[in-house]
Image (spheres, rainbow, N blue to C red):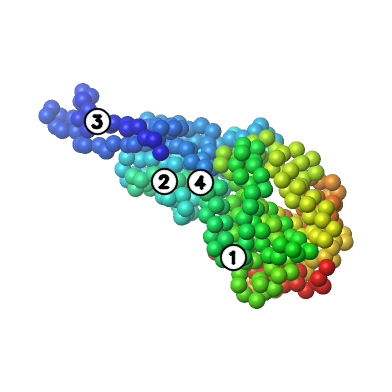
Amino acid sequence: MPLRNAAILASALCVAGCTSMGAEMPERPLLDIPAEARCVGQSLAIDTNFPAGALSSCTIGDDGQIAITIAPENAPPINCSPWYAFRVHTAEATDVSIRLSYTECGHRYWPKVSTDGVNWEYLDPDQVAVREFAGMDFADLTIATTGEPLFVSAQEIIAPATYDGWMDGLLTGGNAGRYLLGPSAEGRPIEALSIGNADAREQIVLIGRQHPPEVTGALVMFPFVETLLGNDPLAVQFRARFHVTAVPLLNPDGVVRGYWRHNTGGVDLNRDWGPFSQPETRLMRDVLNAIGADPWQDLRLILDFHSTNRDVFYTIPDELPTDPELFTRNWLARYQDRMAGYDVNRDARHTVGRPISKAYAFDTYGVPGVTFEIGDETDRALIRRIGRESAIAMMETLLAYPPE
């Protein structure tokens, strides 16, 4: 990253009265200020010049207090998923005070920090104070820096490069293929994984990251897909009978830009299933149309991975007939059996014509559509267990139905 040097002179002229005649000023370290810094103070700077970096405004007071305002990408109404991500630069190890204020919704995500953008830690409770003013929560953070740049983010940053590395790793096992579906509105690649029997009659579609901040949906989709690609007898039998198309990152533009909800067209992609007004959702329409147009292929299931304030499955009610019959009931029962000590939550409802993936799957194809939601702050080890066990339960449940 291009840097310009901000010289804080160790030999600066003394203001009258600041020290006795002849006393030497202590040497103060220099700060490398990012070329696109959002705000700069004495020995301190904030930038967002990285994928998913986002804030609305930033100021640094004379006392070093940082004030950051968070605002959505489009005017309200907008879903309250107030994403933020920025990087703190200090010239030396020090404690930094940051206030996060919001133009809408208020504070939601517990802050996480990272020195490399890959490995993340939660801030300790004694470093975060959430308070309310005028009906909206703000957060005061106290962060100890080492003098090295430090990422501060609403959630772990899982950017397009993260998906690239993950998909590359999956290909080494020989059980998956990777291909380009098409470009996003800004020309970023939207890719798919092909898993299982390419000539299979029974087709499954997985979707991820329609909404940029919903990182825990990505964190559960990773082990879910990895479990389908295992070399155990269950996964091998499943891949022999079924084919899975997995699209893990449908909204790369929104992710890179640090949006709360939308794509760059200002549209919530999970309210565009039916209108298909956006290039990203049109790619998914084309995937499903290709399956529907092939007399040999049958769509069996659509799973859409998301995040909310709790772990929950939004599903089609059992009273509405699906093919496979009662799949969701049977899958979640089997999944619950595998999850001792954990309560599986289901919210079953359906509105005909609602332009979301779940409803579109049922209205158009008569198949189960499920929105797979993970809580914002669900324990990360538990998320991996959820991904693995739900995938095992899905494979067992689907294989228990007679082949089409």
Identify the residue under disc 1.
174
- Along the line of sight, the residue nearer the viewer: 123 or 33: 33
Q: Amino acid at mark 3?
A: Leu
Q: Residue furthest front?
A: 199
Q: Amino acid at mark 2?
A: Leu
Query: Which type of secondary structure does the marked residue at label 1 adopt?
Result: loop
Mark 3 is surrounded, within 10 Å at the Cα level, by few (under 14), some (14 to 19) or many (20 or more) other residues, namely: few
- Asked whether the beta carbons under mark 1 and mark 2 sit within 8 Å of each other, the answer is no
Mark 2 or mark 3, earlier in chain? 3
In the rendered view, would you say 77 is above or below 220? Answer: above
Q: Amino acid at mark 4?
A: Ser
Query: Which type of secondary structure does the marked residue at label 4 adopt?
Result: strand
Query: Which type of secondary structure does the marked residue at label 3 adopt?
Result: loop
Residue at 66% across / 71% down in the picture?
235
Q: Residue furthest top?
A: 16
Marks 4 and 2 sit apart, C-alpha to C-alpha, by 10 Å
Percent across and percent down for residue 162 are: 53, 52
Percent across and percent down for residue 133 are: 57, 37
Can you tell which mark lies on residue 153? 4
Percent across and percent down for residue 314 are: 74, 56
Q: Quadrant of residue 302?
A: bottom right
Percent across and percent down for residue 108 are: 59, 46
Can you tell which mark lies on residue 150? 2
Marks 3 and 4 sit apart, C-alpha to C-alpha, by 32 Å
Residue 81 in view, yes or no: no
Identify the residue under disc 3.
9
